[in-house]
Image (cartoon, helix red, strand yellow):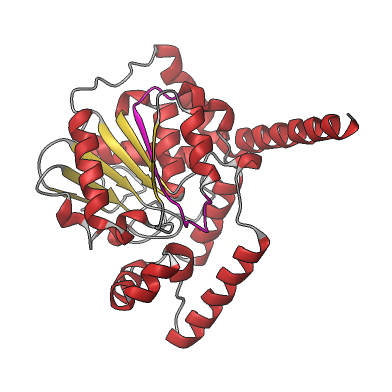
Amino acid sequence: MRTRSRPRLFFTDRGAGDPVLLITGWTVSAAVFDPVADLYLPHVRVLAYDHRGTGRSERWLAPVSIAMLAADAARVLDDRGVASAHVVGLSMGAGVALELGLRMPHRVKSLVLVGGGAGGPSTAWPDLRTAAATVGTLVSDTVRHRQVWPAAALFSPRFRDEHPDQVSEYMSYFGRHRAPPWASGWQVLAAACYGRRGSLSRVRAPTLVLHGGRDVMAPIANAHLLAEGIPGAELHVVPDSGHAVPLEHPRASAELLVEWVRRHASVAPAVPGRGEVIAERITRPFALHAGTLRNTSDAAASVVHRLGAWSQ
């Protein structure tokens, strides 16, 4: 199915119960959720979609911002007549979910941020040794499988060693409906210009931060920053998991999510003021510029702080 509004977004809508909107990450289609969707369907209604210009959604040649992608998530809800949902974002999708919660709090009953971060200069990156080892494994795996094979960035070493057949199955889903090069590049730009550390205290929705302790794409420090910055946020770390926690630990993740939805089923989303609604629409086209300014300001403040500490 596709949304009626343009650009037309491919989406799926399955199951019954409280609506849960799944938002995928960088360049990846919603097909990545297919192997585990059945674990959720007996309990909740699951909506998932492909970002504009990627996967099975309508082609989009222009730049995008995280704010624009968040507005697309709201369009999917509009198309299905869903006023608000529990929003689950994976990787870059966690940033999209967070942005939706900040810009359109009335559409979000709760947030689940998986393998995400606040963006900007505060982002924690893997140390040089870990990054080099991961890249080396990615290259060797890609050569061995004769196709791009990002398993080393997505799953823990233990999972890759003990469940090679499962990893191969998951990789087939990651390879489906891949984004064209220009869309991948625009999403890189969107992520690079995104920074919300200073806005975390404004998140009003109940928030669960789910993160793998062995995540090499978004080290665990990013999860701590989110959990400490968002009022009342709960942090759940899976110590032996990599980046794709819902795939590496599918049953435990599904049980956690279903229980989270049950606990927050009666939550009434925040009601924005008229001024907030107008401001969201006015500022959305300038999100890339605003994000760049926020990140530049945060970086400058960090440099000043370090120089001050050094001078003492």
Q: Where 303 falls versus 239 (above or below)?
A: above
- Taking 48 as reference, is 191 left or right? right
Say which residue appears at 23% left-offset and 40% top-offset.
Answer: 20
Q: In which quarter of the image is residue 109?
A: top left
- Residue most toward the right? 311
**Where's residue 238, x and y in %?**
38, 50
The picture places residue 167, in percent across and down from the top left corner, at: 34, 72
Residue interval drawn in magenta = 203-219
- Which x, y percent locates residue 155? 41, 64
Give the residue at x 53% y 76%: 137
Q: Which residue is drawn at 47% across and 57% down?
A: 214
Across and down, in percent, residue 154 comes to 43, 63
**Dominant secondary structure of the magenta stretch?**
loop
Magenta stretch encompasses residue 213:
yes
Q: Is 273 drawn above or below residue 311 in the view shown?
A: above
Please tell me which residue lies in front, 180 or 218: 218
Residue 166 among magenta residues: no
Left or right: 273 in relation to 263:
right
* In the image, residue 6 above or below residue 18: below
